[in-house]
Amino acid sequence: MSKFTSANNVLILGCGRLGASIANRYSESGINVVVVDENENAFDRLDQLFAGDRQVGDATNINFLKNSCRIENATTVFLVTGNDNANLFLAHICAKEFGIARIYVRFDDPDRSELVKDLPHVIAISPFELTLEKLTSLEKEED
Ligand code: AMP
């Protein structure tokens, strides 16, 4: 069972390169972190000193999120599985069923952002768009 106890509890669904980096940063800051992945080997990406909780399971399984991850106590959630459909589904669940205060969702397909724009407290992030913005601004600097 997860060890969410204090006022600031961060739940990270997906422990790929992005999820693990976020998890390591919060852990370093002394904040309660629970990180979830369906593949136990994904946790190898966590720092040796990672002080959070690791949960192996399917992030789209609501019972698992409730019973093992204590999602109802999460104040911030990062939806960073490598699957846009799973992340989209989870954005709806986190916003509507659990009313989580801060929800960050990653979409590889930037068009998915439109599908969460009316959900409360959801911020969509697309690596594609961020890269494009950065390249455009670099190009402008050179002009
Ligand atoms: P990446 O695509 O490198 O950012 O990694 C995404 C991570 O999400 C991988 O470690 C996958 O094992 C994990 N993942 C994908 N789908 C799920 C899921 N439904 N539940 C839990 N973890 C998942």
Image (cartoon, grey):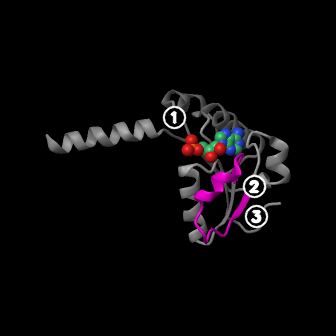
- Residue name at image x 78 percent, y 41 percent: 97
The residue singled out by tag 3 in the image is: 4
The residue singled out by tag 2 in the image is: 55
- Residue name at image x 77 percent, y 67 percent: 5
The residue singled out by tag 1 in the image is: 108
Residue type, mark 2 in image: Gln
Name the foreground residue: 99 vs 22: 22
Q: Earlier in the sequence, mark 1 or mark 2?
A: 2
**Residue 84 at x, y percent in the picture:** 60, 33
* Disc 2 residue crowd, few under 14, some 14–19, many 20+, Cα 10 Å: many
Q: Is residue 95 visible?
A: no
For the record, the magenta segment spans 36-55
Q: Is residue 13 visible?
A: yes
CA gap, disc 2 and disc 3: 13 Å
Q: Horizontal placement of 115 versus 6: left or right? A: left
- Does 83 lie within the magenta span? no
Q: Horizontal placement of 12 versus 69: left or right? A: left
Q: Are marks 3 and 1 in contact (CB under 8 Å)?
A: no
